Structure formats: structure tokens, C-alpha cells
Image (cartoon, rainbow, N blue to C red):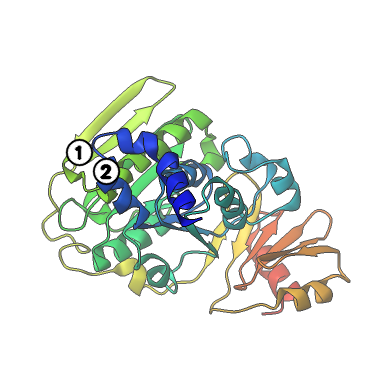
């Protein structure tokens, strides 16, 4: 049986091993590697299948959100049944990825990445991959990466354009070097404001995976060491050399990790593509979802699984996660969102 398993593994990766820069030694390195993917939306659903199928030994999927119909146009791991059930993205993705490669250990974290959990979720891997849609989380990733000396892949895609870079602490600039320390406060295009088409997502995500594979297999000389921008609609492609870390950078040179040390919990408005407000409680919680489902059933139709609970109130519905975080769907008013959270969740 063991010999059959080894033979199956050899056949699975045979075409990748034939690629000389990887070869048997590179494949062995991939099989021993650990990667965390932050965000299982559009980019994450391009990145995760490629890494899992390539044989990266451990992949942690981190995502706070659920699957909705507007996701299906570009988030290629999910289907209509997932959207109808409002499944947690990380959990649904893991289920499908396990069917693609049972040799890979896939860990699921259905949670919001915050200063409270960022180090515990990111500091034990070889590479962090950004599949998020906001700069606040990217700055948090950058802090953890610099603090613990972990390379990370930055990627963003909206409309028809996208940008990517592979950061290596002490070897390249960090995110703060490039964009300054105050870019995590909003004002950037999102898929909710300018839309997004699938081809740019596929291209940026694949470019991120290529850099991750180069690094994990020891092909560091092949890394692009550039900040790359492309627009698939306007036929544009340009790149800028990253160079060295910036002198006096407050993050990578002075080692001030402001996103980690700010210790801010707050309200996130406008989850990408719909009228939804996220309410995050001020301290870490563990919510007994089965008990909460029974409590809320008198107010509306309730469905729950080990990861989340959904209660439909008609025009408004609530998705509650086990960590106390909630998505209030169907409204845009922050005050009303907090009021509904206090009224129904009571924490």
C-alpha cells in the first residue's frame, strides 16, 4: 500500500518535476512547505488550487466571509449550491481542495484577521499569500512578515487591472517602504465601487503563485523583485524594480509594528459587492452557535453549521460566526448595524 501511495504521488507531480528549475529536489521542498493564504475570495480561489495541486504540504485558508451569488462570476472554487447555502468560504474551499489532493494538510480558519490573531495564524509558515481586498489587512500581514522574517506575496485586482509583488524581509522594501505608514485608512478602488473581471484576477493570482513556487523551491535568483502592474483591458504591463529597503522605514528598519500594536477592533463597512456591514465585538468571544440558533429561531428562519449561523429577518439577515463576529446584510447604516447586533446577539 505504501509503495502504491508513493507511486501515485510520483505520477501526480511528474510533469512539474520534469520542469528543470523544480525537479525532484524542488518537489520535495514543496511537499515540506507551509503556506498561509489570507482571503479566499477572487484571488484566493485562484491561488489555493494551484498551490494545493502543486503539492505544498500544508495550506492554511483564512477568510471571514460567506459565499454569495455575486462571488460566482470570479471566485472559481465555488458553485451555486455554496451560494444558496451561504457557506463559509474557507470551509467550502477546503472541502473542494481536499478532493483535489489528499496529501496536502488543509487547515481552515473562518475568522477575521486582526491584531489579536495575526501572529498565531501567520508566524508559523514559510510564506504568507495575500488574497485580501483591503489595505488594513495587508499592513497587518506586512507587520507579521517583517517581525518574524517571513516572505509574503502581495496581490490586488479590481476593475481590469492589478498589482503584485513578492516581499522578502531585509532583502526587499516592505509595504510601508513603498506606500507609507498611513495607507490602510481607505480611499482605494474596490470591486464594490469599480467592479472586477475574472481575467485580471486569474493573471495576478497566477503571478503570485509563480513567485511563491520560485521561493519555496529555492529558485530565489528567478524572483522578479519588481512591483508589477497590468491592465488586461488596456493591454498595459509595466514593472518597477523593488530595490533595497528604504532607510529609516518605521516598520522594517525601526521595527515599529503599528498595525499589530494599535490594538484596534472596529466596524468594517461594505463587504465587497453588496450592502453588508461587519460588526466585530470589542473582545474575543466564543459563541455557542447551536444555542444561539435556538434563541434566534423565534425571530426568523435560522440555519447553522459548525462555522456559522444565518438568521433571515426578511429584508435584513444576519450571519454570525463562532468568534462573535457578524455580517449584517441588507443595510448600509453603521448605527443600525450595531443596534441590530446588540438586539439579537446581545453581546
Check whether the beta carbons of the residues at disc 2 and disc 1 lie within 8 A of each other. yes
Report the residue at 44% width, 74% height from top: 116
> Residue 133: in sight, yes or no?
no
Determine whether 179 is above or below 119 in the image.
above
Circle count: 2
User: In the orientation shown, which residue stands out farthest toward the top?
Assistant: 235
> Residue 321: in sight, yes or no?
yes
What is the x, y in percent for residue 174?
Answer: 23, 54
First in residue order: circle 2 vs circle 1: 2
Label 2 sits on a secondary structure element that is: helix
Q: Which mark is residue 35?
A: none
Count neighbours of disc 1 (C-alpha within 10 A) and say few if under 14, some if 14 to 19, many if 20 or more: few
What is the x, y in percent for residue 177?
Answer: 21, 53
Alpha-carbon span between mark 2 and mark 1: 7 Å
The quadrant of the picture occupied by the C terminus is bottom right
Report the residue at 60% width, 61% height from top: 278
Label 1 sits on a secondary structure element that is: helix
Q: Horizontally, is 296 left or right of 309 in the view? A: right
For this rendering, which residue is in front, 124 or 323? 124
Q: Residue beneath label 2, please? A: 214
Determine whether 265 is above or below 89 in the image.
below
State the image quarter where residue 268 is shown.
bottom right
For this rendering, which residue is in front, 22 or 324? 22
Report the residue at 56% width, 42% height from top: 192
Determine whether 52 is above or below 16 in the image.
below
Q: Residue beneath label 1, please? A: 222
Count neighbours of disc 2 (C-alpha within 10 A) and say few if under 14, some if 14 to 19, many if 20 or more: some
Amino acid at each position: 500500500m505504501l509503495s502504491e501511495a508513493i507511486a501515485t504521488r510520483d505520477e501526480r507531480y511528474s510533469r512539474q518535476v520534469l520542469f528543470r528549475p523544480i525537479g525532484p529536489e524542488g518537489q520535495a521542498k514543496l511537499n515540506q512547505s507551509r503556506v498561509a493564504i489570507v482571503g479566499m475570495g477572487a484571488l484566493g480561489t485562484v491561488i489555493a488550487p494551484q498551490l494545493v495541486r502543486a503539492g505544498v504540504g500544508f495550506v492554511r485558508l483564512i477568510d471571514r466571509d460567506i459565499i454569495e451569488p455575486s462571488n460566482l462570476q470570479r471566485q472559481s472554487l465555488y458553485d451555486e449550491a455554496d451560494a444558496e447555502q451561504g457557506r463559509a468560504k474557507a470551509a467550502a474551499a477546503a472541502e473542494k481542495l481536499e478532493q483535489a489532493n489528499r496529501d496536502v494538510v488543509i487547515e481552515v480558519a473562518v475568522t477575521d484577521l486582526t491584531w489579536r490573531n495575526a501572529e498565531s495564524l501567520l508566524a508559523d509558515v514559510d510564506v504568507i499569500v495575500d488574497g485580501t481586498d483591503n489595505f488594513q489587512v495587508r499592513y497587518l500581514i506586512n507587520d507579521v512578515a517583517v517581525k518574524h522574517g517571513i516572505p509574503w506575496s502581495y496581490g490586488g485586482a479590481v476593475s481590469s487591472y492589478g498589482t503584485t509583488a513578492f516581499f522578502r524581509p531585509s532583502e526587499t522594501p516592505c509595504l510601508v517602504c513603498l506606500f507609507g505608514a498611513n495607507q490602510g485608512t481607505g480611499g482605494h478602488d474596490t470591486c464594490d465601487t469599480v467592479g472586477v473581471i475574472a481575467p485580471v484576477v486569474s493573471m495576478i493570482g497566477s503571478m503570485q503563485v509563480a513567485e511563491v513556487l520560485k521561493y519555496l523551491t529555492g529558485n530565489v535568483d528567478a524572483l522578479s523583485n519588481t512591483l508589477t502592474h497590468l491592465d488586461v483591458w488596456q493591454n498595459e504591463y509595466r514593472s518597477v524594480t523593488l530595490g533595497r529597503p528604504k532607510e529609516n522605514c518605521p516598520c522594517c528598519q525601526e521595527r515599529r509594528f503599528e498595525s499589530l500594536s494599535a490594538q484596534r477592533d472596529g466596524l468594517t463597512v461594505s463587504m465587497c459587492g453588496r450592502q453588508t456591514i461587519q460588526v466585530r465585538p470589542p473582545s474575543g468571544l466564543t459563541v455557542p452557535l447551536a444555542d444561539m440558533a435556538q434563541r434566534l429561531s423565534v425571530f426568523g428562519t435560522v440555519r447553522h453549521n459548525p462555522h456559522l449561523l444565518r438568521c433571515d429577518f426578511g429584508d435584513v439577515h444576519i450571519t454570525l460566526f463562532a468568534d462573535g463576529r457578524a455580517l449584517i446584510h441588507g443595510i448600509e447604516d453603521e448605527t443600525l448595524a450595531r443596534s441590530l447586533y446588540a438586539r439579537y446577539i446581545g453581546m
